[in-house]
Image: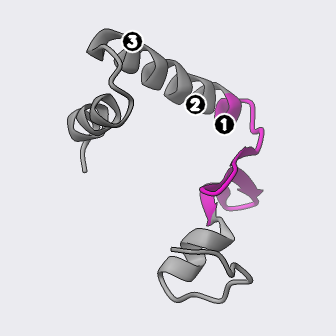
Amino acid sequence: MNKKEWIKAVIKETNQPEALVVSILEAGLEEIYQSMKREEKVTLQNFGTFYIDVRRSGTVFKFNPSQKWKALFGWASSYRGEL
């Protein structure tokens, strides 16, 4: 799924005008970007956590998926809800 497809899916799911959806998604992505730039951890419930791992060899961008996502892909997970 690319960004345009994501926007169309959110429009379909929410029945909101395209301009509003684009504005909200862009603002959300910008907030994540700014947080990462400040080396802050970003946690989105039921999705996962983005964070920066600073090492001697350089800075590494990391993503730790939520337990629900881990369960979806058959990775070790404590999630017991519906997938």
Tag 2 residue: 33
- The residue at the point 60 percent across, 60 percent down is 63
Query: Could you say where residue 8 lies in the image, as x and y percent from the top left?
Result: 23, 33
For disc 3, the marked residue is 20
Disc number lying in front (1 or 3)? 3
| Residue for badge 1 | 36
Residue 22 sits above or below residue 11 on the image: above
Residue type for callout 3 = Leu
At label 2, the amino acid type is Tyr
Q: CA distance from mark 1 to mark 3?
A: 24 Å
| 81 left or right, relative to 55 | left
Looking at the rendering, which quadrant does residue 81 occupy? bottom right
Q: Are marks 2 and 1 in contact (CB under 8 Å)?
A: yes
Q: CA distance from mark 3 to mark 2?
A: 20 Å
Residue 42, compared with residue 77, is above or below; it is above
* Residue 38 % position (x, y): 74, 30
The local secondary structure at tag 3 comes to helix
At mark 2, the secondary structure is helix
| Secondary structure under the numbered disc 1 in the rendered image | helix
Instruction: Decide which of tag 1 and tag 3 comes sooner along the chain.
Output: 3
